[in-house]
Amino acid sequence: GQQLNQSPQSMFIQEGEDVSMNCTSSSIFNTWLWYKQDPGEGPVLLIALYKAGELTSNGRLTAQFGITRKDSFLNISASIPSDVGIYFCAGPLGAGGTSYGKLTFGQGTILTVHP
Amino acid sequence: DAMVIQNPRYQVTQFGKPVTLSCSQTLNHNVMYWYQQKSSQAPKLLFHYYDKDFNNEADTPDNFQSRRPNTSFCFLDIRSPGLGDAAMYLCATSRVGGKTREAYEQYFGPGTRLTVT
């Protein structure tokens, strides 16, 4: 089945720094999503990507759908303390039918921001 | 605001004592998902309902069951909780059958943290 490898596993940065993380898949995806999870809460959808090469921003966050369709990238500019959390990439699980809508998740990137 | 609600947020149960977690949604989405998330791990899909159709993941233990009495509500039943079932349980929803891109945009509830003593 599909496997997503997300890196880095964790990041410790200073407030104001930019952050980059990425996700690679063992198979081609037609959709990439990025979620953020705060401690003790459910994941929140940040950005969804649907086309190879697509670059989409949400405030200080920018995500890209890789040209090979096997990777995606998330950048956070000018980090602030509330950016702390776990960032997950996700892509379709399965090949349609009753699998339509199902997601598989990367292992997550734990982000710590020092004031 | 439209949302996914999970109750309770924290649940403590005894080893072997049945427990039910609930999820409701005001998004009017036709698909509801249940995930198990253990500490520092990715959410793992247990099963989902596509309208009234139940779809179980191959590796979901028989100890886990689900009910969806109507569009808005979905329940997760753990028949005989073991210590290994302690985790965060997440409910999510999406709309499948409309715009293609909406199908994978899952919206999560805040989760229920289950402790087994």
Image (cartoon, helix red, strand yellow):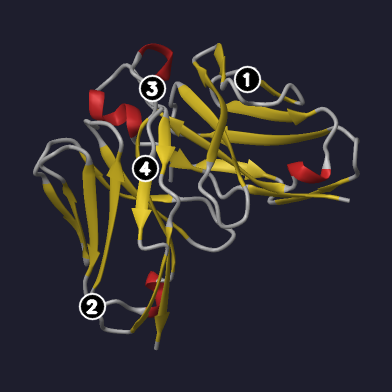
What kind of residue is marked 4?
Leu
Q: Nearer the viewer, residue A19 or B95?
A: A19
What residue is shown at x 30% (from left), y 36% (from top)? Answer: A26
Q: Chain of mark 2?
A: A
Report the residue at 21% width, 30% height from top: A30
Q: Secondary structure under badge 1?
A: loop
Residue type pointed to by label 1: Arg
Q: Position of residue A81 (x, y in %)?
A: 40, 79
Are the residues under marks 1 and 2 on the same chain?
Answer: no
Q: Are marks 3 and 1 in contact (CB under 8 Å)?
A: no
Residue identifier under label 2: A78
Residue at image mark 3: A94
Assign a secondary structure to mark 2. Answer: loop
Q: Which residue is mark 4?
A: A4
From mark 3 to mark 1, how far is it between C-alphas? 23 Å
**Residue at the image point whose x is 42% and y is 36% from the top:** A104
Residue contact between numbered discs 1 and 2, judged by CB atoms under 8 Å: no
Q: CA distance from mark 3 to mark 2?
A: 36 Å
Name the residue that disc number 1 marks: B68
Q: Callout 4: few (<14), some (14-19), or many (20+) C-alpha neighbours within 10 Å?
A: many
Kind of residue indicated by mark 2: Ala
Left or right: where does residue B21 sit relative to residue A108? right
Task: Say if A86 sits above or below A53 in the image.
Answer: below
Res A96 → quadrant: top left
